[in-house]
Structure formats: structure tokens, C-alpha cells
Amino acid sequence: MAEESWHEARLIPTSGINGAEEQERRATSALLAVLSAVKEFGRGFVKPFGAPAGTLECFIEVPFILGEKRLYPDGLIRVTRGSTTWTALVEVKTGPNQLATEQLENYLDIARDNGFQAVITISNEIPAVAGQHPTKVDKRKLKKVALHHVSWSQVLAEAVMQKEFRGVADPDQAWILGELIRYLEHSKSGALEFDDMGEAWVGVRDQVTAGTLRSNDKGIAEVVARFDALLRFASLQLGRQLGTEVVPVLSRKEAADPLLRAQALATSLCTTGQMSGAIRIPDTVGQLVVTADLRAGRVTCHVDVESPREGRATTRVNWLVRQLKNAPDGTRVEAFVAHARGSQAAELLSTVRENPSSLVLDPAKELRSFRLAVSGSLGSKRGRGRGSFIDSVLTTVDAFYLDVLGNLRAWSAAPPKLRPASPEPVDIDESVRPALVSTDYSSQDGAREGADEAGVGYRASDRVAAASSAHPGAVAKTDAD
């Protein structure tokens, strides 16, 4: 038998998974075991939930009694530091399975009765806003116990960033973390990517196309929530590749009240047929804005770039073009001037490369910023694959960063240069040196008008004084004039 058909032994195998229950149990055990084995990964996982730095222990299917029921949470995490103990129950779902309200409320009651600090849920559900839980529970049960949620996409992204970018001190622990990454990336693990726009997608999409969608129509809330979840998934996916934290951008009001964001998206979808959102990538020139236009069937990514603050208008355009060597010719470039609404001019990058002045309609107006945009076809299908809405958005985001945004650098002024030092004084005949020190050459004066044979410059008043000794008459005439 050829070796190519042999399967390498893995610490966490995907073979033998039969059904959702086995898939869930194996994913839970694998994750919790690696959390306790890899110190850096375990600390990074529990720190955002308020756990102290200490010894981390993990258990699975711990039995508890609640009333007359015997319940088995999927896992339990305990962190001990001195006399301080922090404990959290863990509930896990894999595949398309969703968290249940009744089950979570039972675990919140168990945590409260036992003095535990938190309940952590892990599933493929991605909330529209960071920190928001995808399952609604009775808020009264959250007075003493915190409820946190992590998607499998986020777990995978954190694992990759810890291993590949932040680092793991122990080589054996790094290998163990790599085995968890391989497992989670396998389709049989149940840690799925974002793959569905929801049951309401087709109906809402068709209403937008027909122009009949209203803000109170059934299903619109689910669609806008799924769009924000898609932006979060795109951020996690991009951050995993870049090794940095990429997050969707929300205003302070939207972060405080997620309903405002949902209402704004619903209004935009009804009036213009568009949904848009921004992604922040560290150390880039600006936010990556994604706009999905369902009526036009186009998805657009754009970024706003501040123009240099010096130089002619065409010089500023050339500064931008030099950074776009890898950008496609179809990239749209818009120029914005000071004290004006909207863009002054817009051209394709192919035209701007040949004629930078095509973006300068009025040289007297100062160019303040540019907008670079790339558009592509927007898929309409609900799931994943060719012609899907999700894949068309993800592909456009990745391509825009690779070809445009990732190559841009912000303008910075050149540092000031030192003025050349004044020449060293040279001994000359005291008879021709001016008597008053105030007539000596100053660094604030203009260019010197003359120089003696020794190379020392002197002013016009010095020249007059020298001329008076050589030609008295000429000086007298000058005085008379």
C-alpha cells in the first residue's frame, strides 16, 4: 500500500465521531484539556472573563443537583491563586446546534447556588455585537453570575494567534496547541465557519429587489443581525491570517445600545437596499468599510486616506499612486478638497496612473483626502459556495486588503533639517572692520552682498566705510545724494 494513503496519528483524532453528541463531547474535552496544558492559551482564554492568573484546572460533565434534577454541564473551569478561587461552568454546542434558554438558566442557578462566578457558552453562533449573548435569558439570573459567550471561530482565531504570533514558551505545549488547531479546522470537528444567512434571507432579499421591504417586516431583524455577524466572522478570519486583533467598528452609542445599530441597518436596507459596516485593522491608514448593495447586486470595500499636507495637487496624487502598484486598474479613486461637500473628482486607477491631473479640477483648491474603492459581484444564495452572499463578501474583503489597504502608508512630514553653521571668523585688518558690533552679519540677515579677498562677507555699510578711505570724493557725493 502506498504511504500517501496512510493517516498520520493525531493527538486529537477526528475519526470515530458518530453523531452530534460524540462530536460535542470530543470538542469539549479537547478544548478544556489544551486550556489546562498550554499555560499561555489557557490564561488568554479566561482572562477576559475576569479570572485571576493562577493554576487552571478543567473538568468535563461534572454532576450537579438542581431541585429534583441531576444536571451535567459540559465542563467546568477552575482557577486558583492563593486563597482566591474563580470557577465557571461551560456549555458547548457544535455544528448547527444552538444554545437553549432553559438549559442556560439552569446552569446559572447552579453557579449561583455553588458560589461560582460565571457560565461560559461555546457554539458556532456569532453575536452581532461583541459582548452580546446570542441567547436571551432572564436578566435577574445575571445579578450574581456572569454569562459569557465565545464562538468556535473566535476560539480558533485565538489559538492560531497564540501559537503563530504571540508564542508558546514550551515546544511541547506549542505542539499540543497545534494539534487543537488541526482538529478545529477539520470539518468533522463541528467547529463550523459562518455558513448561513438565516431562514429569513431569501424573503428579505426578494423584497429588497422588488422595493417592497418595510422596516417592520418579519425577518429583517434576523438578516441585519446576520450581516453584522458576518462582519465579525470576516474580522476573525482576517485577524487569524494577520496575527492581530481585527474588530468591527461601532460608535459609542451603538456599543452601549446594540438596538440602535440594528435599527440603522434596517432603515438603510429599506430605503437604499444597502447594508454597510466598518472593520478596524491595527496600523492601517483607515477603516475598511464594507457595503453590500442588494438592489445593484454589488459589494464594495473602500478606505479613506488623508492626503499629504504639502506639495502641489498633482504631487499629492502621485504620492498615492506610487503606493498602488498592486491595486487593480478598476479601483475607483475619489479626491476630496477642503471646504467642499462630496468628492471633487472620481476616476479609475488606470486613468489616474496615466494622468494624475485628472483628479485635479481646480488647482487652487487644496486636496485633503482620497477614497479608494473596489467593487465586485454580490452573491444572492443563503449558504456558502459559488454565488453565495457570504463568500462574495469574504472574498472581496480579503482581496481589498491584499491589493489595496495592506500596501498603504500614512503620509508624514519630513523632519526639519539643521541650518548650516556660520563660517568661522578669519583675522582681517582691523582698519576695515566696522567699529560697531551691531553691524556684524546675523543669521537672520539675507544673503551677503560682498566678500573681501579673505572670503569674509560684509554688509553694504561696511562697503561704504571701505570706499570712504579709498575715494573720499565718491563718498561725499553719495552723502550729498
Image (cartoon, rainbow, N blue to C red):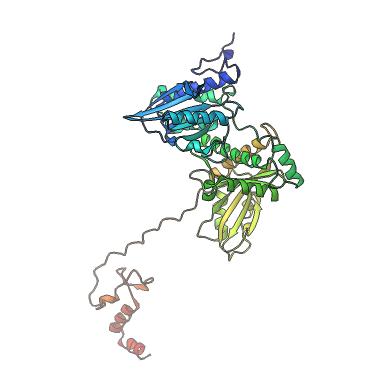
What residue appears at the point 59 percent right and 29 percent down from the top-left corner? 98
Say above or below: 406 vs 27: below
Task: Please indicate, yes or no, whether residue 31 appears anywhere in the rendered image.
Answer: no
Q: How many marks?
A: 0
Name the residue furthest bottom.
Answer: 480
Q: Percent x, y for residue 226?
A: 62, 38
Direction right: furthest residue: 210
Where does the image place residue 88, in percent across and percent down from the top left?
44, 29
- Classify the position of the C terminus by image quarter: bottom left
Q: Where is residue 317 in the image (x, y as percent from the top left)?
A: 57, 55
Please say whether residue 86 is visible from this viewpoint.
yes
Q: Position of residue 137 (x, y in %)?
A: 55, 35
Quarter of the image where the N terminus is located: top right
Which picture quadrant has residue 335? bottom right
- Which residue occupies 36% across, 62% down? 419
Q: Residue at x 36, y 32 (%)?
A: 53
Look at the picture and state if 428 lies above or below 242.
below
Q: Nearer the viewer, residue 318 or 303?
A: 303
Q: In this view, does 416 lie to the left or right of 339?
A: left
- Residue positioned most to the top: 1
Residue sitting farthest toward the front: 68
